[in-house]
């Protein structure tokens, strides 16, 4: 019989499950985290749990927070578990479970983030970290800059006391800190966005520009926004994971996290109000975060984006199954080696070829159970960050983009909402309606998709890219995904 996860039952959980070695009563909150999802609980919370297990940094515990209505479900679940989470690392043949206790509270999720702002009046909270997904940054995909015309930013500029966006909430909290004479907190983005620290700073300061120039100057001059690179493959939680945890480990956790064993965190060491000693639990502090970040975004996230759409069109469900398909794996290998890796700048101490081989092994882990649907979602935010920058770099130097144009064509074909067998699926993207309309129209006129200039930007103006894209898309519609991939691997399109 499985045991319910909470503090009362913690000591009686099976011996096979690792438990916190510290007393929760000794923890004091130092970080407020916005966007408590699976990745955060498998990554940042695990690093802190290990630090606390070593008896260090006990004043850096986490308080959870959320902006979206959907965050209420996470808060309610974790509250019933006394903020504990079970993390299961999925190494084939050697799965391991642990309970983490780094979170000590989760502010109520309410309209306009007022509970977050009130919590941040406490000077003990010295870091606000974020995993709000790429779409939460209100970025113009075509330029990569903060979009002042985004509806949430427009609202927050006019009504800062009732903010809708995470950055409106952060700006209001910083304004109150300034007005109360308290030191500002550090804002730490942990999202997969190029130069995420800079993007977060400009999102907050750009909003302040529209409200009060002196507040904008305060943000730019007094508030730290360190960049970071984070990495751990963490699938969504389903009934499959809940049942596996109960049956294999004897624990009832209503929202466990299953993840791969690998994890990495690279941070810029810019925390004026202090930080936990995360270097003692494997975090890399370096002024060269951008190099690690670009490597990961292009090779790993770009690789995920590259296999998602051919696998989806072929009806493949799991990522490891896609890697077992010779055509999908061959496409990824050729694309990475010939077009993506050659435009990734060197990273000190890292062999890029070996890094890619590590990525390929991680994608192939069958125990993780990561899904193609997860990789394929939110393409309108992910393609401009993970694929199109490599395309732009290669076009700039006159290099071939046949494979990268094929990725964009596969995405377009996927956005039509039907796989090669004619099975319909729901497109999971905030711009789904617009994407599907353009994708269907592009069957007869490829420019209909490329004319989404907020996504493709100046790439759509390249005659080389347009030609490669049009040829690839035409073949996908006429011959299907398998035949198109075979042709690409054979040396053409």
Image (cartoon, rainbow, N blue to C red):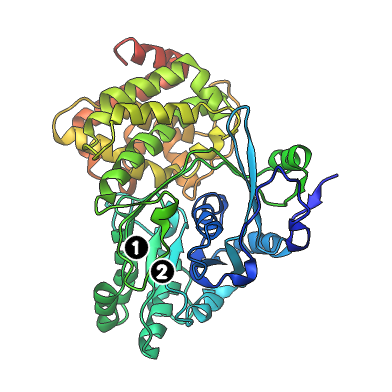
**Label 2 CA crowd tier, 10 Å (few <14, some 14–19, many 20+):** many
Q: Nearer the viewer, residue 474 or 72?
A: 72
**Label 1 CA crowd tier, 10 Å (few <14, some 14–19, many 20+):** many
Q: Which mark is residue 200?
A: 1
**Residue 77, image x, y percentages:** 70, 59
**87 relative to 246 in the view: left or right:** left
Quarter residue 183 falls in: bottom left
Q: Which mark is residue 264?
A: none
Quarter residue 189 falls in: bottom left
In the displayed structure, 379 sits above or below 343; it is below
**Residue at x 40%, y 38% (from the top left corner):** 301
Where's the N terminus, which quadrant? Answer: top right
Where's the C terminus, which quadrant? Answer: top left
| Residue 109 shows in the view | no
**Residue 218, image x, y percentages:** 27, 79
Which residue is denoted by mark 2 in the rendering?
A: 167
- Say what secondary structure mark 2 lies in: helix
**Residue at x 34%, y 69% (from the top left corner):** 204
**Residue 76, image x, y percentages:** 69, 64
| Residue 38 shows in the view | yes
Say whether disc 1 or disc 2 marks the residue closer to the N-terminus. Answer: 2
In the displayed structure, 379 sits above or below 11; it is above
Gap in Å between the C-alphas at discs 1 and 2?
8 Å
- Say what secondary structure mark 1 lies in: helix
Q: Nearer the viewer, residue 68 or 50?
A: 50
**121 relative to 203 in the view: left or right:** right
Are the residues at dot 1 and dot 2 in contact (C-beta closer than 8 Å)? yes
Quarter residue 138 falls in: bottom left
In the displayed structure, 160 sits above or below 243; it is below
């Amino acid at each position: 019989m499985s045991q319910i996860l909470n503090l009362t039952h913690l000591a009686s959980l099976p011996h096979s499950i690792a438990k916190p070695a510290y007393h929760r009563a000794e923890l004091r909150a130092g970080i407020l985290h916005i966007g408590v999802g699976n990745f955060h609980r498998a990554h940042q919370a695990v690093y802190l749990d290990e630090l606390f297990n070593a008896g260090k940094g006990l004043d850096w515990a986490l308080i959870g927070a959320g902006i979206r209505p959907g965050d209420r479900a996470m808060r309610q679940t974790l509250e019933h578990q006394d903020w504990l989470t079970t993390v299961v690392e999925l190494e084939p043949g050697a799965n391991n479970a642990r309970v983490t206790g780094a979170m000590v509270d989760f502010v109520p999720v309410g309209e306009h983030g007022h509970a977050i702002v009130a919590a941040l009046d406490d000077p003990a909270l010295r870091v606000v970290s974020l995993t709000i997904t790429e779409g939460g940054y209100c970025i113009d995909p075509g330029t990569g800059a903060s979009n002042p015309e985004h509806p949430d930013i427009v609202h927050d500029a006019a009504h800062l006391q009732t903010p809708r966006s995470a950055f409106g909430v952060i700006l209001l909290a910083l304004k109150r800190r300034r007005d109360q004479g308290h030191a500002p907190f550090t804002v730490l983005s942990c999202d997969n966005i190029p130069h995420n620290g800079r993007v977060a700073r400009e999102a907050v300061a750009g909003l302040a520009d529209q409200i009060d120039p002196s507040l904008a100057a305060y943000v730019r001059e007094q508030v730290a926004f360190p960049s970071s690179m984070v990495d751990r493959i963490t699938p969504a939680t389903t009934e499959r994971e809940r049942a596996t945890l109960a049956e294999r480990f004897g624990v009832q956790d209503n929202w466990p996290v299953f993840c791969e064993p690998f994890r990495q965190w690279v941070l810029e060491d810019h925390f004026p109000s202090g930080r936990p000693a995360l270097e003692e639990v494997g975090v890399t502090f370096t002024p060269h975060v951008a190099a690690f970040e670009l490597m990961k975004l292009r090779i790993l996230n770009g690789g995920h984006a590259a296999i998602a759409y051919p696998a989806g069109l072929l009806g493949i469900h799991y990522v490891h199954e896609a890697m077992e398909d010779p055509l999908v794996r061959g496409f990824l290998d050729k694309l990475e080696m010939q077009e993506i890796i050659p435009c990734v700048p060197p990273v000190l101490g890292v062999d890029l070829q070996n890094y890619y081989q590590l990525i390929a092994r991680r994608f192939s882990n069958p125990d993780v159970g990561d899904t193609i649907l997860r990789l394929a979602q939110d393409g309108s935010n992910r393609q401009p960050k993970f694929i199109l920058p490599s395309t732009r770099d290669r076009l700039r130097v006159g290099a071939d983009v046949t494979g990268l144009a094929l990725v964009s064509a596969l995405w377009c074909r996927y956005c039509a909402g039907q796989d090669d067998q004619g099975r319909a699926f729901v497109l999971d993207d905030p711009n789904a309606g617009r994407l599907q309309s353009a994708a269907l129209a592009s069957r007869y006129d490829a420019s209909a998709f490329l004319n989404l200039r907020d996504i493709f930007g100046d790439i759509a103006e390249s005659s080389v890219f347009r030609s490669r894209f049009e040829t690839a898309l035409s073949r996908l519609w006429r011959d299907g995904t398998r035949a198109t991939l075979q042709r690409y691997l054979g040396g053409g399109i």
